[in-house]
């Protein structure tokens, strides 16, 4: 939803982003046009955290590799892969919002030590979550697993770049269920090819769907899913009704649950 599109919608009062991230909407332009921007940040928190944990476990337990081995008639009860213990290892979480906090809760269930970097979350919230606050560089260098749960902004675009990846342990894994451009994909491919880290689990990519010659598609230390972390039978059942409720609230002059640009509240007479 670009400025050009929004300026052409002369009778539009509300734009709904059917997801968490609203980087696909020019919020500044919408605000100037008096258009409410709504997102849905709370409907599939557990699903995305589950997806991140699933990718982590698939990498840790080498599930995809072992599955392929068996299908090629190779049965190895003691496989030739390094497998971390999980318990006693460290996960670093970038972004301790709803999904990041849900991921921390799951990681604790597997007895991982949980550290996180999020300059926008208070020390009190860190303490409530039982998560240790560290700097960005400390998170990158100390973690055995790094899970990304940050929105895509100018600040976070390519925050995981070559310099950041070079800080990682060579036996560490990167998990991304947030937004593809949070990671500089060319740098990640280089890092995986040159062995700076052990592997990656990616539900999101810079370009979706990826080009057929994307090197990530042929790497046996990469587990991919098609930006599907938000799905479950329950979330699919709930979402259409929720979308309608949010839009109807604005059209009826009521505040939606998650108004991205509160500057339009007075203009739209939302109460």
Image (cartoon, helix red, strand yellow):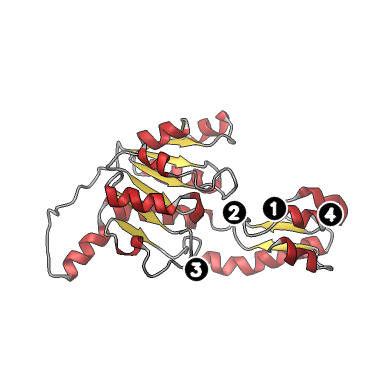
Q: Earlier in the sequence, mark 3 or mark 2?
A: 2
Judging by the rendered image, the residue that carries numbered circle 4 is 270
Decide if residue 12 is in sight here: yes
Residue 18 in the image: state x and y as whole percent: 62, 63
* Labelled disc at residue 42: 2
Question: For the residues marked 4 and 3, what is the alpha-carbon distance in whole angstroms?
Answer: 33 Å
Q: Quadrant of the N terminus?
A: bottom right
Judging by the rendered image, the residue that carries numbered circle 1 is 258
Question: Of residues 49 and 212, which is closer to you in this image?
Answer: 212
Query: Residue placed at 59% from the left, 55% from the top?
Result: 20
Near mark 2 (Cα within 10 A), the count class, few <14, some 14-19 or many ≥20, is few
183 with respect to 221 (left or right):
right
Question: Of residues 152 and 106, which is closer to you in this image?
Answer: 152
Residue 80 in the image: state x and y as whole percent: 14, 53
Judging by the rendered image, the residue that carries numbered circle 3 is 233
Q: Are marks 4 and 3 in contact (CB under 8 Å)?
A: no
Question: For the residues marked 4 and 1, what is the alpha-carbon distance in whole angstroms?
Answer: 13 Å
Residue 124, quarter of picture: top right
Please tell me whether mark 4 sits on a helix, a strand or a loop: loop
Residue 159 in the image: state x and y as whole percent: 49, 43
Near mark 3 (Cα within 10 A), the count class, few <14, some 14-19 or many ≥20, is few
Decide if residue 54 is in sight here: no
Foreground label between 1 and 3: 1
Please tell me whether mark 1 sits on a helix, a strand or a loop: loop
Relative height, residue 253 to residue 155 (above, below):
below
């Amino acid at each position: 939803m670009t400025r050009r599109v929004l300026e052409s919608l002369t009778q539009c009062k509300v734009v709904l982003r059917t997801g968490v991230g609203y980087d696909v909407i020019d919020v500044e332009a919408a605000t100037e046009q008096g258009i409410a921007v709504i997102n849905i940040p709370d409907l599939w928190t557990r699903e995305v955290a589950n997806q991140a944990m699933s990718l982590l476990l698939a990498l840790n337990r080498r599930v995809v590799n072992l599955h392929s081995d068996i299908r090629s008639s190779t049965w190895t009860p003691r496989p030739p892969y390094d497998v971390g213990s999980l318990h006693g290892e460290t996960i670093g979480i970038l972004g301790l919002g709803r999904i990041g906090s849900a991921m921390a809760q799951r990681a604790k269930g597997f007895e991982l030590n949980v550290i996180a970097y999020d300059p926008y979350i208070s020390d009190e919230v860190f303490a409530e979550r039982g998560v240790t606050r560290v700097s960005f560089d400390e998170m990158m260098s100390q973690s055995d697993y790094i899970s990304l749960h940050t929105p895509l902004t100018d600040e976070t675009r390519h925050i995981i770049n070559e310099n950041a990846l070079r800080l990682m342990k060579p036996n560490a894994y990167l998990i991304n269920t947030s937004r593809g451009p949070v990671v500089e994909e060319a740098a990640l491919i280089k890092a995986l090819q040159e062995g700076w880290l052990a592997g990656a689990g990616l539900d999101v990519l810079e370009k979706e769907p990826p080009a057929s010659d994307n090197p990530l598609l042929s790497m046996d230390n990469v587990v991919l899913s098609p930006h599907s972390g938000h799905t479950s039978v329950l979330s699919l059942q709930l979402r259409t009704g929720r979308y309608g409720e949010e839009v109807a609230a604005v059209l009826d002059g009521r505040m939606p649950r998650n108004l991205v640009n509160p500057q339009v509240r007075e203009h739209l007479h939302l109460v």
